[in-house]
Image (cartoon, rainbow, N blue to C red):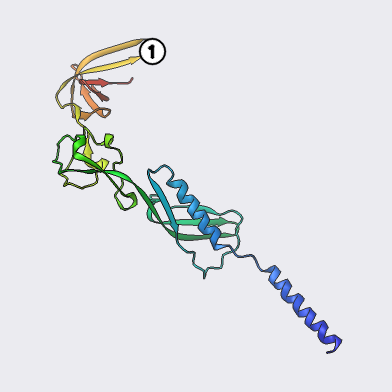
Amino acid sequence: MTRSFFSALLLSFMTLATAQAQQPAHQDAAAIRKVVEQFLQTQTAALPGKVTVTVGQVDSRMNLAACPDLQAFQQPGARAWGKTTVGVRCTAPAWTVFVQAQVSVVAEYVAAAAPLAQGQEIDPSQLVMVKGDLAGLPNGIVTDMAQAVGRSPTVSLPAGTPLRMDNLKTKPVVLQNQTVRVVSGGAGFSVSAEGKALTNAGAGQVVKVRTPSGTILSGTAREGGIVDVAF
């Protein structure tokens, strides 16, 4: 082979190497999936039970430039458990990709051990703890019997039904038209007077009270027909 042939061949290799070096590095899909997994683990850290995160694959057809700072996010109102989607964005270079994931939360929750009638006060013998995936259940599932004991269901519930906080109401400690003791205090003083409750209220709930003078006050209902009013 001639000297000129070798020179041309060497030039071709150098040109190819230079072109490859100038091409931007591609983003590692595994790094994107890892960011999604860490984000979901953080979002579900306060949930009870065992959390398992399974992240879906990143579309291999996307040609994303390498990013030095990946940022995971979710759309407002999105749940971080069950079947969910997490976005990963890069500001420089600018791109955004969405990745699907499945998050299971296996824990114990409270269910009705026997049929519960609407308005019936619940006692511990009527409840049972069941283990399952909370991600497959509605929001507000009761996970502690103490949250349900003493409350009553707003609708009748068959045995085996998972209890939800929005389906339970507290036992009223103040009844509509009941004469209550309105109590207020501050630094160095305490006053009390009688009033009439305008609505029912459970312990800790806000209730409106009309005083003998006709003034309407808002306060916090307490056991014993007491309403705390802050000034």
Which quadrant holds residue 28?
bottom right
Three-letter amino acid code at disc 1? Ala
Residue 11 location, x and y as percent? 79, 79
Q: In the rendered image of this protein, does residue 61 appear above or below residue 67?
A: below
Left or right, 204 with respect to 115, comes to: right
| Mark 1 nearby-residue class (10 Å; few <14, some 14–19, many ≥20) | few
User: Which residue is nearer to you in this view: 121 or 180?
Assistant: 121
Q: In the rendered image of this protein, does residue 214 appear above or below residue 134?
A: above
Residue 156 location, x and y as percent? 15, 44
Residue 144 location, x and y as percent? 30, 38
**Res 70 seen here:** yes
Which residue is farthest right? 3
User: Which residue is nearer to you in this view: 202 or 216?
Assistant: 202
**Res 75 seen here:** no
Q: Residue at x 47, y 46 (%)?
A: 42
Which quadrant holds residue 9?
bottom right
Q: Residue at x 29, y 44 (%)?
A: 109
Please tell me whether mark 1 sits on a helix, a strand or a loop: loop
Q: In the rendered image of this protein, does residue 3 appear above or below residue 67?
A: below
Left or right, 221 with respect to 107, comes to: left
Which residue is farthest bottom? 1
User: Which residue is nearer to you in this view: 212 or 22?
Assistant: 22
Which residue is farthest top? 188
The residue to which callout 1 is attached is 187
Q: Quadrant of the N terminus?
A: bottom right
Q: How many marks?
A: 1
Q: Quadrant of the C terminus?
A: top left
Residue 94 location, x and y as percent? 57, 59
Q: In the rendered image of this protein, does residue 188 appear above or below residue 139?
A: above
User: Which residue is nearer to you in this view: 99 or 178?
Assistant: 99
Q: Residue at x 80, y 83 (%)?
A: 8
